Amino acid sequence: MMKIMYPLLFVLIALFFLGPTVLAFIASMTPASEFYDYSHIFPSRLTLEHINKLLFTLGGFKALLVSIEVALISIAIAFALGIPAGYALARYAFRGKNAVTLAMLFTRSLPLIVVSVSLVTVYLRFNLADTAIGVALAHAAMILPFVVIITSSIFSSVFIEYEEAGMVFGLTRFGAFIRISLPLALPGLAASAIYGFIMSWNEAFAASILSIQNRTLPAHILATAMASPDYFKYAMATVMAVPALIFIFIIRKYLISIWGISLK
Amino acid sequence: MNVLAKIVAQNVKKYFGEVKALDGVNITIEDGSFIVLLGPSGCGKTTFMRCISGLEELTDGEIYFDDKEISKLQPKDRNVAMVFQSYAVWPHMKVRENIAYPLKLKKFKKEEIEEKVKWVADLLNISELLDRYPSQLSGGQRQRVAVARAIVHRPEVLLMDEPLSNLDALLRVKMRSELKKLHEQLRVTTIYVTHDQVEAMTMGDKIAVMNNGSIVQYGTPEEIYKKPATAFVAGFIGSPQMNFFKCNVIEDNENQYAQFEHIRFRIPERINSRTVLVGIRPENISLEKPGGNRESLSLKTTIYFVERLMPETILHLDIGEGNRITVKIPYDIALSEGEEIEVFVTIDSLHFFDADTEERAL
């Protein structure tokens, strides 16, 4: 009985999550002539026409590149600041530690879009308006609290004895962090990189405010979607989803763990 | 190549805020010896070891290896090695890389590293495990890898922090003798931290018993057992625990007597205390009157409880007024609860401690 139930359950869950995605993919590849024909669910043929048009005629591809650039830069900034902070939270006891953690969480109660409006004036002064770095800075601010909190929990799951052994056997404190703790934390760090990537990838409002010409994909879509035919909207959904799926697919082995061990 | 260090600690103090983890530790450890730091949890033994390794900075005092002060150096500059309680074998490196890593960091040549890893792997019987990851090893095997990693670069000082406490009982006994044999071969100055008195008694050339952040006695296992310096040491070493009686000291013209409830006996030599703690080891109490003319004390008792450990027996005896003593006899005997028996202790096997200072009075 259980032998049938488990696979059945997994199939149902998979359908629940994948079903709408697959339908959107199909809709994005349905020829315009068949799109409003309700007599059959699956179109007679699939076409990349809408996606092609979206990417190469309507500026989607350029926006996609901007999106990737923004996501990578914002992860880099958030990690450069967040990893040391997370490490410090995990390893050291200091006054106001809980307050720091709480304050970081509270920054999320201020919507990024509100901050963005005032950011624009600052950016105009520093020539950062309408640049990928400008948007990335805003996204990094959005991602940073999560990176700090996630990495601190990752580092506290890496035994401090591993580092101490490193120091006894010839590493400096910093060396022990680089050679011992960081590699051991890598699977968790990769997971939080995915998280950060997706947060930046999906963020549309701040990106819309902070850029005009160099828009990220979601901002670009937000600006053009209302005026487009429905099959373009589906094409947009596909273009948004596929790179994120590919990114997760590449990095997924780190999620499962790279040395066949759990960190605990 | 085989350099050994004499370790001298002078007035070592370590405070964590208000907590005095180490409150003035003084000790001299001869080069090449195996000494055990023994004490209850929280006594400061692990903290002291971490101070020697450099993982903990001293609040005050100095530590020397031979004549060189090392207490301000970073751990990596001290030429110490450590076996951690959790082994701390790095999970992202194979066994071979784990063992080779200290050598690599000390810039040994590649051929030399290979040769040394092979030597130590043979020594610890882990040659066939070299290409595995630590997650594929059992606890005992991981322990061996941790020891191999610690001795491969021939450190001046080897520190072991309760290395056997995570092993099962059988393996622990086996590793006890193996570690001791290993030390006889390598002769590296070793400090071994444990709370297990059996490990301490069987392994240590000398034992330093610690309590409340300082060393209360430092001596050979025999000295510690036979002449405990304080009531704490006397109570901590020995199983079952020593029996203690708080006695008043009464004098007449010639002699001093110890008086406990209705029991009174002569104190063999003059002592200066007004009240004493008299300690009797359970194994020094017998059911037969000692032969010869050894002065002895006899107690009339009622059996409260009998523990048969096979072959030895532990008796819990009522000696009146709610006081009990434990007695260990090395054989099994047909006795039942409620029976009245007389037991004997020779006066020369009694330990006398001052009741106020708890220091040995005689």
Image (cartoon, helix red, strand yellow):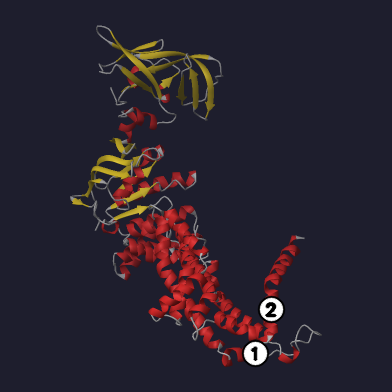
> As rendered, which of A170 and A91 lies closer to the eye?
A91
- Please tell me how many numbered marks the rendered image carries: 2
In the picture, the disc for residue A165 is none
Q: Is residue B289 left or right of residue B293?
A: right
* Residue at the disc numbered 1: A50
In the picture, the disc for residue A22 is 2
Residue furthest left in the image: B67
Secondary element at tag 2: helix
- At 27% from the left and 40% from the top, the residue drawn is B25
Q: Position of residue A232 (x, y in %)?
A: 65, 86
Q: Is residue A113 visible?
A: yes
- At 32% from the left and 26% from the top, the residue drawn is B358
Q: Position of residue A83 (x, y in %)?
A: 42, 65
| Chain letter behind tag 2 | A
Q: Position of residue B351 (x, y in %)?
A: 33, 23
In which quadrant will I find the N terminus of chain B?
bottom left
- At 43% from the left and 73% from the top, the residue drawn is A76
The type of residue carrying mark 2 is Val
